[in-house]
Amino acid sequence: MLRQSSSTIRDMTACEAVELLRQRRISPLEIANDCLNRIDEINPSLNAFCWVDRDGALKAARLSEERWFRGAPLGALDGIPATIKDLTLTIGMPTRRGSATTSDAGPWNVDAPVSARLREAGAILVGKTTSPEFGWKGVTDSPLFGVTRNPWDKELTPGGSSGGAGVAAALNLGMLHQGSDAGGSIRIPASFTGTFGFKPTFGYVAQWPESAMRTLSHLGPMTRTVPDAELMMTVISGRDPRDGFSGPDYPKSIAVDLERLEGCRIAYSADLGYVDVSEDIRRVTDAAVEQARALGAIITEIDPGFSDPIDTIEVLWCAGAARVLRSLDDQQAELLDPGFREMAQRGLNISLAEYQAAEMARSELAAQMSAFHQEHEFLLTPTMPLPPFPVGRVVPDPSIKKWAAWTPFTYPFNLTQQPAASLASGLDAKRLPVGLQVVGARHNDRRLLSVCRILEKQLGRLVPPCIARFHHTRPRARITERCLT
């Protein structure tokens, strides 16, 4: 196979790599070595990975190379490096869930459905990405693995809870990354790192063991590009008998795919009617929406008409945290992140009537959004109302008492179980990424991804400055198709 330079592999998308593998112009071993070497160089500074399986990845790459030479690839992702979030079981890799209450003893001999599907398709699983303890908050730090930092400015958070996956996606440390999202945990880091994150309709990607947040939690792809996420979804979606909520089947194709947005009915709400949005975020988002209009979309500026459901998500989140706390003994409980323990204690005091009321409010919100999408196929909003903030904080400002209050655009659509994505829409005045959220009706995932693909072509991709510049001050950055040098 022809040799590729490290910079070429560094910039490569999964779709490009698959095509080069088919043409025998690159080898899985070259891809894996480049990825692992850059993880070794970069990870100590940013903490995207809590576990790297160098030996396992190189062994898998050699086997993949043999299959490609025989002309018998295992599946759609044979030879493509991928990562798994630390909340997801993976054979041969510890799943610590960011918690000192867990042990690394194993045995790690079971794959969760998403890990199994990636492996069965030939993906090379290079390691586990960092998460806060049990994925409980929208930033990524934990008592066990410490602080994960943003590649745009390492004094800032990349968001969470899939923050490690967001950093890995931004720097192409692996080409495909699995995230999970029970209140924004895919979309927050996608926005803060300038990458693409997709929370599919609940049930399309099987989840086992069940999340503590139960039916709020969705698994999905985090990638540099929309086509890579589309490719990943074709592999990780599908039923699994261990997940009683999995299904229906993810559609194999779209009746009418979108090439342009001509005539597409899209609503735009800059603040959902109640969110305090940074003027800078509003400016960048307004400009992105105008690009959608220029592509032929019929844009209607309208709020979806619901009030802030933070009390509903708070009840369900605290109840989920309480489930975890009940499973621990007193000694383990003392090891918990204090913020998680406080939330779990509140959950212990939730009455059955309060929990049922929250579930009823959730059902009403889902019905309201279903009716909304009868008139508007998609809804655009900012992904986040504010830019990335300094590491070491659960919330950007001490006056915010509930962690979810600073991510008001994301959690409503976990309550409704709709597909929602975040794609990069531009840079703010401080040259930090801004995300655009695209929300669709349940089971309209493939059309939503088509809209995102079209918008991404128009808006361009955000790529952070190269790692050599991280060690001093924040570098300049721009929208580009390639990493700055």
Image (cartoon, rainbow, N blue to C red):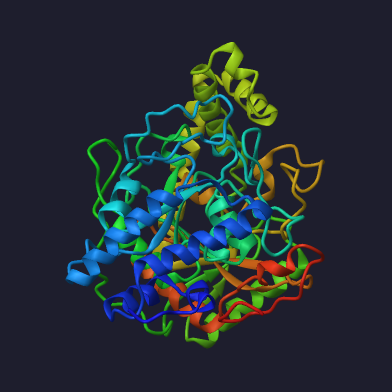
Tell me if I can see residue 443 in this picture.
no
191 and 97: which is toward the camera = 97
Q: Give the quadrant of residue 245.
A: top left
Tell me if I can see residue 246 in this picture.
yes
**Measured from the top left, where is residue 278 in percent x and y?**
76, 63
Rendered view: 471 above or below 358:
below
Residue at 37% of width from left, 29% of height from top? 107
300 and 344: which is toward the camera = 344
**Measured from the top left, where is residue 123 in percent x and y?**
33, 58
**Measured from the top left, where is residue 430 in percent x and y?**
79, 70
Considering the image in quadrants, where does the C terminus appear? bottom right
State the count of labels.
0
Considering the image in quadrants, where does the N terminus appear? bottom left
Residue 75 as seen in the image, left or right of residue 262: left
Residue at 51% of width from left, 74% of height from top? 6
Residue at 55% of width from left, 21% of height from top? 325
Rendered view: 134 above or below 176:
above
Residue at 72% of width from left, 74% of height from top? 283
**Measured from the top left, where is residue 168 in percent x and y?**
55, 59
